[in-house]
Amino acid sequence: MLKTILLVDDDEALTDNLTDILSDEGYTLYSAATCADAVTVAAKVNPKVALLDLKLPDNSGIQLLANLKEHHPDCICALMTAFADLDSAVNALEKGAFHYLQKPVRPVELINLLQRIFEIIQIREEKRLAEERLKESEKRFRTIFESARDAIYIKDTNLKYTLVNPAMERLHGFKADAFIGRSDEEIFGQDISPNAKEAELRVLGGEIIETEEIRWVGRNKKTFHNIKVPMGGGAGTISGLCGFERDLTATKQLEAQLLQAQKMEAIGILAGGVSHDFNNLLQAVMGYTHMLLNDREAGHPDFARLKAIEKAAERATDLTRQLLTFGRKVEINPRPVDVNYVIRQVETLLKRTIPKMIAIELRLTDSVHTVNADPGQLEQVLLNIGINAKDAMSDGGQLIFETANFQPDDAFRRVNLNDNPRPYVLITIRDNGHGMSEEVLEHIFEPFFTTKQAGQGTGLGLAIAYGIIKNHQGHLACASTPGVGTTFSIYLPAIDAIAQPEAAHPVEPIRKGIGEKVLVIDDEPFLRDLANDMLVKNGYEVIMAGSGEEGLTFYRQQKNAIALIILDLIMPGMGGKQCMAEILNFNPKAKILISSGYTMDNPKVDKVLSRAKGFIAKPYNFREMLRVMREVIAAK
């Protein structure tokens, strides 16, 4: 610390003497002979201490004292006076002088006085620095406290709030004034956990408590993660507690969605694994049934029985397709779709199937955006939800379909829409039926979960709807209140396109072969026999192979005679893909149709499968199969 002293006295001899003495003691002295000079010097050097003569040529030392106090409030002033001026010196002390020295000034007394003064200055400086550090610390605390995303609060030993941050206000929807001086019971009433007070009393006993609790905030149930720590007071006492509260609701929703997605993925894998074999079996049932039906007139005794077999096989095929749809393993054929048109089609279907005491109302936005969707699958979603609503309104009610353009906020996009930046179309289906409990609501999208009686439902309807909407990069949500009703919300990403009207597709006649040779490669004997019977009956010559290796051998032997290959993808040993690669290596121009019991990933992105001329799904639709075969064979 620089020890600067301003000496104001018109006695040059005294000034020189004191300058020598104080310089030897390490002080830096600046001198002035008049009040005016003293004011000028003080403005330049800002002295720590001023030694003032009581009587100066142009004014009194008391007036100079007042001036210095005004312009240099941190400067400590001491007066020097003759014996006769003691009354004036006392007056100066009353006006703020620190001390006075009687002339002639004794060096020892002056040095002692200055030591005391600079000790005071040192203490004052340390105090000032401590206060600045405290203010800076408080500023940092306030910045952290007010900008924290987590709620932070402080309570006293009576468990009443003394301080809350803005995040606490936002989290609970109350201003700070609503918290201060009040306890949780006074603010939240019965919504607070009954164990919360007991935990906080333990914190006041010195524990650190970390808990997770669920409670209602307004009309929303939220999950909170809490950390509460004791706050120390004087002499090792505890003056209260500090709590940190984080809203985990969105995180829990994401975890639930992930768990649901994992369940769906598991079912999808299971469905994909069994569907190939199951569809092979159905192919045999349906194929031979169709062949027998073609050989019999409607009045034949077996005709009705065969139709019953055909219907049962079709229902089994639908069930397999539903499982694959749920597992998001069915190929979708998206195109620009007007959701209002689809809803009107669904309305027509529902009016034929639900009781007339249920009124259907459409509230459709005329300017609703176009979506990229498979209209058949979207129709299935709306029908599934509509039929569920019918079951919830056994005594009649109202079923409302609404459409609207929807612009989600960032939080909604992050949690439900994978941060997709596009605008959305919102389809809302609302009923005023008996509603669902919270426990039921948590399971409605799970496969095979149903509240219906045995034999009245498979529990796949909503699970399939969920899978379809997710396959369309959308989101399906449900809200329900017992005794009030249920609302389903479907969010589909909008596209910049115009939906085209539906075109009618007339039924084409069966297109038969003209003696071409077809190589059928399939590991299932009954499917080979069925394909042989059907293709031979429709004008083709057939070569059968039970494995990829056998099929490759036949093709190498009769390459020029074989017009088309129908190749099953899933076979033991040499699989269909490897067999196809070998055939194309032997003859790059070979015409191959690949077939499978489940829809594979897009073959266009696979270097081998992308070279196939087409894909035939099992169980075969023979009319469609014959059409595709004819087109591929005829193509150059």
Image: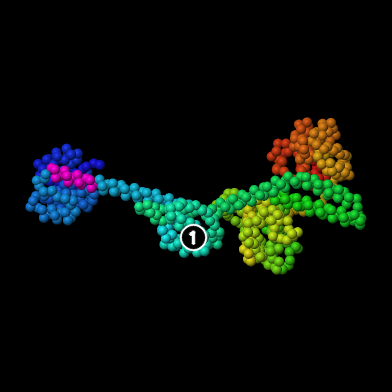
Question: Image quadrant of residue 523?
Answer: top right
- Camera-side residue: 566 or 155? 155
Q: Which residue is mark 1?
A: 173
Q: Residue at x 26, y 48 (%)?
A: 124
Q: Residue at x 20, y 50 (%)?
A: 68
Q: Is residue 123 left or right of residue 221?
A: left
Please provide percent x and percent y for residue 626: 83, 45
Quadrant of the snapshot with the C terminus:
top right
Please provide percent x and percent y for residue 232: 39, 52
Task: Find the magenta span and give its range.
Answer: 107-121
What predominant SS class does the magenta segment belong to?
Answer: helix
Quadrant of the snapshot with the N terminus:
top left
Please provide percent x and percent y for residue 381: 69, 56
Q: Residue at x 18, y 55 (%)?
A: 95
Q: State the SS at label 1.
A: loop
Q: Is residue 25 left or right of residue 346?
A: left
Check disc 1: other Cα within 10 Å, few if <14, some if 14-19, many if 20+.
few
Q: Is residue 159 left or right of residue 522?
A: left
